[in-house]
Amino acid sequence: MTTEELDPLIHVPTRLKIVATLAALPDGDGLSFTRLQDMIGLTPGNLIIHLRKLEEAGYLSSEKSKNGTAPKVTTVALTTQGRKALTTYTQALRDLLGGL
Amino acid sequence: MNHTPDPAFAESSGSFDPKQAAALLDQTTLQARRSFTSGPPLLWVYRAAFVLVAFGGYWLDVRHRNPYSAPSGGLLAVIFTLVAINIGVSFWLLKRASTGVSGPAQSKKRTWIALMLPVWVIAFAVTAPLYHASASHPTWGLYPANAPLMIVGLVAAGTAALIKDWQIVCTMLAIAIAATVAGFGGPAGAWLILGIEMCAVCLGTAAFKFSQRHRSAVRP
């Protein structure tokens, strides 16, 4: 197995951090954009670029909600496909590193 | 998501080594688990010390006198202070962990907590009417040490099973069993047995949570 076989969508430091952070939540739960931004330590613009790529691949879903007069809250969550992709990526890493 | 993206940072894979990726995955997972946990191992270590001091102190206070009496005011003040710290820190950690998190698991957890709050209050509040109703010595002597934690433990385990939180189920069943066993220690001895057992349950939970948090995301 070679590094090229690792999922290129996840095998980028920032996106790996995003996916790993969201995977720590129970299945189906999501995280607000602002909290994710705080945890990853990116500017909103940079985070959006990575989130869009993951969303386009079907790895995560985003939802905008509004409660009364409060500002809209964007929530992102890892999809079942995203969890499977991370599991596959982790297994590939394990194989590459010889079972560690 | 209407912010302006900065293309300079959009892609930064470069030569991302698998070893670096594995380390980053482990590190990020650990940080995320720490961030989303409302009951960290350290809180359970505090609870272990708290139950040992509270129940052990109660036993020291009543063992050489009438065990069917309330403990000294000084000990009660210490116990109430420790309880207040436990409640305050628990709610602060819960708020910190759940900020920005939403979804079915989060809703179930909130419902479970809302259900358990009155159960805790009712289980301990019953001791007051028992005292005023001049309950028999065995009842009065054993109820406060055993029954509240048996009730809370069983109700919490049953309701946690409904939301499939098996870690809470195990901890709460252990608490209910510990409270039942402590009853065999008699009115004074029950407090000491309960203190030791509860301390062991809390330390066991702390060790389990620590191992779960630090288990590698990459290594099987």
Image (spheres, rainbow, N blue to C red):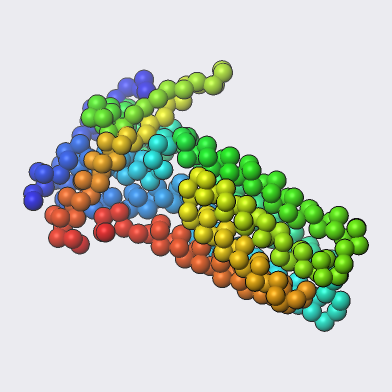
At which x and y percent is residue B136?
Answer: 87, 67
At which x and y percent is residue A40?
Answer: 36, 40
Tell me the residue at 47%/65% (across/down).
B207
B100 is higher (above) or lower (below) than B16:
above
B93 or A94, which lies in front? A94
Q: Residue furthest bottom?
A: B64
Q: Quadrant of residue B196?
A: bottom right
Q: Is residue A62 left or right of residue B107?
A: left
Tell me the residue at 41%/43% (across/down).
A26
Q: How many marks?
A: 0
B9 or B130, which lies in front? B130
Q: Is residue B31 left or right of residue B164?
A: left
At which x and y percent is residue A10?
Answer: 22, 40
B120 or B55, which lies in front? B120
Which of the image's four quarters has the C terminus of chain A?
bottom left
Q: Quadrant of residue A68?
A: top right
Q: Quadrant of residue B191?
A: bottom right
Tell me the residue at 75%/56% (across/down).
B124
Q: Is residue A1 left or right of residue B124?
A: left
Residue A14 is at least partly visible in this image: no
At which x and y percent is residue B145?
Answer: 73, 66
Tell me the residue at 20%/51% (across/down).
A91
Q: Is residue B36 left or right of residue B11?
A: right
Residue B206 is at least partly visible in this image: yes
